[in-house]
Image (tube, rainbow, N blue to C red):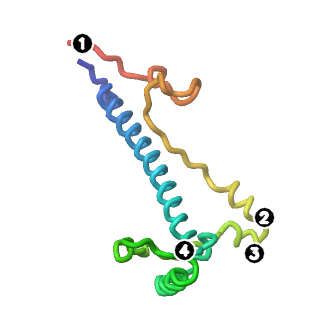
Amino acid sequence: MATQVAGIGLLTKKTLEAARNACAGSAAADKLKTAADKERDAALGQVFFELGFANMDRLKALCPDELAIAIKQSLVAECALETGAAGLFVIVQTSAGKYPKWKEEFSACLGPAEVGRVESETAKQYSYAVVDVASAKPGAGVLLGCAKAVKSAKK
């Protein structure tokens, strides 16, 4: 059982294990999502390549109505739809928005020196995770055993 020192919180092994497990689970989910996103992008790229889109930039510029027209034209001129596939699949819009290339636009208007100034004056932000010591890179991180700690004592 741990003893509590007045005014100091007690960081328990259970709390650290829960944080480590949550961080590891999140990292694993991120890796799975990244892999799934790459697989999705490759599959969609193949679909649109078969429909005659040489690159995704042209596709991204089309609204749903324009895409529908381009696909109909492509199915007549460039691509055939396998028997049995018609009516089974639909291409839907999942998002829309304006995504300007701010850094390039900012640089074009005010120059690269101003971009550099803004970047250098922007505070760096950090993210952290709790991992097992054995899985940490040598010299990386804060070893909790070396930080000021409240000693555990059995009653």
Counting residues from the N terminus, which is met first, the one under dot 4 or under dot 3?
4
Q: CA distance from mark 2 to mark 1?
A: 62 Å
Residue 121 drawn above or below residue 13: below
Would you identify the image quadrant in which residue 99 lies? bottom right
* Image quadrant occupied by the C terminus: top left
Counting residues from the N terminus, which is met first, the one under dot 4 or under dot 1?
4
Q: CA distance from mark 4 to mark 1?
A: 70 Å
Q: CA distance from mark 3 to mark 2?
A: 9 Å
> Which circle, 1 or 3, is nearer the viewer?
3
Percent position of residue 100, x then y: 61, 73
Instruction: List the residue tagged with mark 2.
Output: 112
Q: Is residue 17 visible?
A: yes
Instruction: List the residue tagged with mark 4.
Output: 51
Counting residues from the N terminus, which is met first, the one under dot 2 or under dot 4?
4
* Image quadrant occupied by the N terminus: top left
**Residues at discs 4 and 1 in contact (Cβ within 8 Å):** no
Q: CA distance from mark 4 to mark 3?
A: 38 Å
Residue at x 65% of width, y 69% of height: 102
Q: How many marks?
A: 4
Q: Judge left or right: residue 124 versus residue 120.
A: left
Q: Judge left or right: residue 90 versus residue 51.
A: left
> Which circle, 2 or 1, is nearer the viewer?
2
Instruction: List the residue tagged with mark 3.
Output: 109
Q: CA distance from mark 1 to mark 3?
A: 67 Å
Look at label 2 and name its amino acid.
Pro
> Which circle, 4 or 3, is nearer the viewer?
4
Residue 47 drawn above or below residue 27: below
